[in-house]
Amino acid sequence: MATPELVQPAPEETPRGVPSVVATVGSRRAALLRLLASLVATMAIFSALIVALGENPIDAFDAFWSGAFGNKFNVGQTLMIASLLACTGLAAAIPFQAHLWNVGGEGQLWFGAFASISLILILPDGMEGWLAITITVIGSIVAGAFWGFIPGILKATVNANEVITSLMLVFIAIALGDYAISKLFPSQSNSTESVPFDRLLPNIWEGTLVTAGALLALGAIIVAIVLMAGTSLGFQIRAVGLNSNTARISGMRTGRVTVAAFAIGGAFGGLAGAIAVLGINSALVAGFSANFGFLGIAVALVARLKPWWIVPSALLFAALRTGSSGLQAQTGISSTVGEILVTVFVILLLAFGVIRLRYAEATQ
Amino acid sequence: MIVTDVFSLGVALMIPMLWAAYGETLIEKAGVLNVGIEGVMLIGAFAAALGVSKGGGIYAGLGFSIVAGVLCGSVLALLYVRLGTDQIVTGIMFNILAFGLTTTLADEILSATRVTAFSQYEIPLLSDIPFFGEVLFSQNVLVYAAFLAAPVVFYALHRTWYGLYARASSEYPRAAEAAGLDVWKLRYVAVVAGCVLTSVGGAALFSSSGGFVSGLTDGRGFIALAIVILARWNPYWIVAASLLFGVSEALQFQADRLGPLGDVPPDILVMIPYIVTILAVVLARASRYPPAVGLPYRPSAKAS
């Protein structure tokens, strides 16, 4: 005998006007003032640091600008870094919308890169280039999804703290990458064998190193927009983020949504790994990721977790990254100042309340 | 004896995580989740390296790292407590900031540092006991201090007024405030004190690794987060849990003497502590954070 259906199935159409998990506070003008204040404070702190390191801040900003946008080639580099950051930004943004802390985008990126290099070098020699690339890209996405699936399933089944599990998987994935470099496909001391030329993502902008990887990233953004705005799963992810109890009571399987949000986030991280290997470095290079997975969290936050805002946000952070490489070339200051600049900016955005995470459950 | 060697090394390796776990316990028992623990530890290690490279010896380094702990604690307390920023996101950002800051500054201002360790001290009589003598009583002073700190942390949390108040503010801050307590002040104290202990863990790590390199902590701070959960915020259990991770880390250095483990590539052995951490978090599934941990608190008296 069939039991009567008591709960409403999830609505097919996404209702409009559902508030987002992340919202700025106060009026638009106040928010703008806060944003300006955090920008000015970031500049001040960064200038002070540059002076402390014995350089002229004006020259430093000049070197920064030319590193990011000084010529066509550098603009291309910024675009490619932005492609990586867009993917890792999505890796954070989608689970964050479900109020799940996938802070392991770095691990999903590394595991995707590990899967990429393994697949592309193992696939038989006779295979067509485009086919090998397609298989590898899909394989990396699946690998990344698997790396995201682990903290997701552990969270959903035994309520294991996803911050810790996803962070631990970062270190495991990096160790796997080091293993590929030192044992599986050894070549030079800090890189695997190179990917054969016909199996690299093709160049799409002459005079730069911009490859089809940028298009893959753009595709990822579009997929994420459609997923979050136009599918029932996207709606459920947001509903769980707003209030998982309400979501459960209204009939959503929150455990499944948890796993799905994590796996989808991981898939984007895995794609970033494929872009890095096939579209940027042509090999798995030790330390190829300058914390790109972690910076994806910053990208996602500044984009207020909205997929379409991730494009400008990723471009901004990519410019800060290539800018700091320019600074390194001119002054010799380590390019890790880029990390300082980015994190000071984001922490000030948090401090000034420009980025404020708000949850139904937190406001008891 | 291979077992003695593994445990003896394990005890030495557990110490940085042990200090950090004490620090995290203090902070979480006041209702704050310090995900920035990794960064605080890294800055502590860098500060110790700075003290040593300025010619002050390892004890000057320890002093530097205590100061660094106070500074980190003040910044984090301002963010977590006063400004009520999201603790997980702020913590992660702080970790990257610490990575960038220490790497940049290490390039610029650290001179090549000699290997320096804390003074080794063999406790008379006790160090003659087989196994335990070598494992527990032939270590450096910071190791002994770490073991002695367990009852101190326990006493502070469970036998003092401060500990009672702090725990109240991690359980139900609204009630703590109604009882006349200043939740913010309790949390400030806890965050600063906890960051000092975490930073000392960084100094311990620096002294046992013999030199500062970029990203020296390599996840040990995050492992300490797991240790605290596994040990359920009890300092004595924290010692036991830290030993588990110290030993799992020691395995990779003694692998060539451990039969089949010797054939496993070193890059794979590096993973052991991280895998053990995931297992620990899974096994500690019944362990629950105090209810208010991680949630910013806005006192009704200080509407801002």
Image (tube, coloured by chain):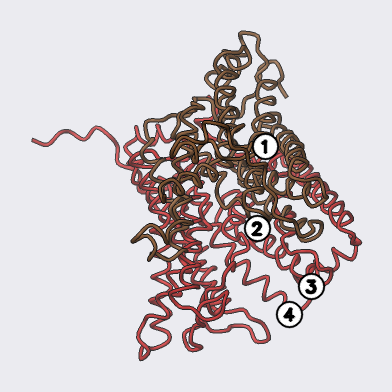
Chain colours: A red, B brown
Q: Is residue A312 visible?
A: yes
Name the quadrant of the C terminus of chain B. Answer: top right
**Could you confirm whether marks 4 and 2 are on the same chain?**
yes
Distance from Cα at disc 3 to Cα at disc 1 = 40 Å
Residue A62 horizontal/vertical position (percent): 86, 67
Residue B191 horizontal/vertical position (percent): 66, 30
Callouts 3 and 4 close, C-beta under 8 Å: no
Vertical arrangement, residue A309 with respect to residue A207, above or below:
above
Residue drawn at the location 56% of the way across and 50% of the way down: A305
Q: Which residue is mark 1?
A: A25
In the foreground, B151 or B290: B151
Q: Which residue is mark 3?
A: A329
Callouts 4 and 2 close, C-beta under 8 Å: no
Chain name for mark 4: A
Q: Secondary structure at mark 1?
A: loop
Residue drawn at the location 70% of the way across and 46% of the way down: B43
Relative side of B16 to A40, left or right: left
Distance from Cα at disc 1 to Cα at disc 4 = 39 Å
In terms of sequence position, does the residue under pointer 3 or pointer 1 come before the other? 1
In terms of sequence position, does the residue under pointer 2 or pointer 1 come before the other? 1
Q: Secondary structure at mark 2?
A: helix
Chain name for mark 2: A
Q: Which residue is mark 4?
A: A72
**Could you confirm whether marks 1 and 4 are on the same chain?**
yes
Callouts 3 and 2 close, C-beta under 8 Å: no
Tell me the kind of residue under disc 3: Ala
The disc placed on residue A313 is 2
Callouts 2 and 1 close, C-beta under 8 Å: no
Residue drawn at the location 40% of the way across and 82% of the way down: A132
Tell me the kind of residue under disc 2: Ser
